[in-house]
């Protein structure tokens, strides 16, 4: 069963290393679809029949890149990852073995030293929570997937565990399930932000499940040098505000559950007020 790996990339110095890592550590049928969003990588990508390259003459953003890759993907499964990641050997088989038709699966996440191309020795980030959009008084509302350290420690022994949200640098699901929702639409969000908030929330609220699979892992480099996608403040702020309003106020007409159901499922959740009457006081 083929896995289609989608890598949207813009000015990424470690794209070639990421692709090589995926090809080296996958054990099943795999294709790697790299989307060069208005640039050419240096070093060049591996010359391998499993690598498909889509080139854009001008940058359009991560969401359009994912959607364009989806159009050519042939796999039963779809995995999206950032262009600066490494993976455990056999990651593809482990993820595919426990991925129901309406699941989104996230591997256990570590940090990456991109110079040594080694997993860092820090504790894994096994759990995330969807934060209350108004947790930071005086700042614009933002609903993000933040590391939930205590839940990760408390449930380290649960190898396939429910995950409220995630950071978004890697996720795995059936391709036809992703296609069912039209990929990652741009309407309201713009070309980049809140990708996993959309992917994860629509999965939970439509009756599906988001899980973290700790039987495999990936490591992710946290960029600090301005490489990669550079977001305009307008696109970023507008998309984040749209997402917060959309999900907090239950504006998705196709939902089976409301946001209250999701928060209750993981309660108590950091940042969310106990009194539900206060959740929308600032809307």
Image (cartoon, helix red, strand yellow):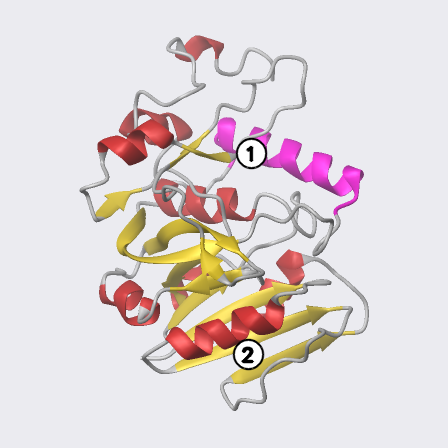
Secondary structure that dominates the magenta span: helix
> 243 or 165: which is nearer to us?
165
Q: Is residue 254 visible?
A: no
Q: Which residue appears at 37% of the width and 61% of the height? A: 173
Quadrant housing residue 128: top left
The residue identified by callout 2 is 72
What's the CA distance linking mark 1 and mark 2? 30 Å
> What residue span does the magenta drawing correspond to?
231-251
The correct choice, above or below, for 87 with respect to 167 in the image is below
Residue 202, image x, y percentages: 43, 45
Which label sits on residue 55? none
**Mark 1 or mark 2: which is in front?**
2
The residue identified by callout 1 is 246
Quadrant housing residue 41: bottom right
Residue 218, image x, y percentages: 41, 58
Would you say 158 lies left or right of 132 here? left
Q: Residue furthest left?
A: 157
Residue 17, image x, y percentages: 56, 71
Q: Residues within 10 Å of mark 1 (few under 14, many from 20)?
A: some
Q: Is residue 96 magenta?
A: no
Q: Is residue 23 visible?
A: yes
Q: Which residue appears at 28% of the width and 30% of the height? A: 265
Q: Residues within 10 Å of mark 2 (few under 14, many from 20)?
A: few
The correct choice, above or below, for 164 with respect to 260 in the image is below
């Amino acid at each position: 069963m083929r896995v289609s790996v989608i890598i949207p990339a813009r000015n990424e110095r470690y794209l070639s290393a990421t692709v090589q890592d995926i090809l080296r550590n996958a054990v099943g049928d795999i294709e790697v679809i790299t989307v060069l969003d208005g640039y050419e990588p240096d070093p060049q990508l591996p010359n391998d029949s499993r690598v498909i390259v889509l080139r854009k003459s001008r940058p359009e953003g991560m969401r359009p890149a994912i959607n364009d890759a989806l159009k050519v993907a042939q796999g039963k499964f779809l995995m999206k990852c950032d262009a600066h990641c490494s993976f455990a050997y056999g990651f593809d088989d482990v993820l595919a073995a426990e991925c129901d038709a309406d699941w989104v699966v996230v591997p256990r996440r570590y940090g990456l030293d991109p110079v040594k191309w080694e997993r860092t020795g820090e504790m894994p980030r096994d759990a995330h929570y969807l934060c209350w959009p108004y947790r930071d008084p005086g700042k614009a509302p933002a609903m993000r997937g933040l590391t939930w350290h205590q839940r990760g420690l408390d449930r380290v022994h649960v190898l396939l565990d429910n995950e409220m949200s995630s950071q978004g640098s890697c996720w795995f699901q059936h391709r036809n399930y992703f296609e069912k929702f039209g990929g990652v639409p741009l309407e309201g969000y713009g070309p980049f932000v809140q990708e996993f908030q959309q992917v994860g929330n629509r999965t939970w609220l439509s009756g599906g499940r988001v899980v973290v699979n700790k039987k495999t892992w990936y490591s992710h480099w946290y960029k600090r040098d301005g490489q990669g996608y550079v977001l305009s403040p307008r696109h970023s702020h507008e998309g984040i505000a749209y997402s917060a309003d959309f999900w907090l106020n239950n504006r998705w007409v196709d939902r089976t559950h409301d946001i209250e159901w999701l928060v209750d499922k993981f309660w108590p959740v950091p940042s969310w007020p106990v009194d539900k009457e206060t959740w929308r006081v600032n809307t």
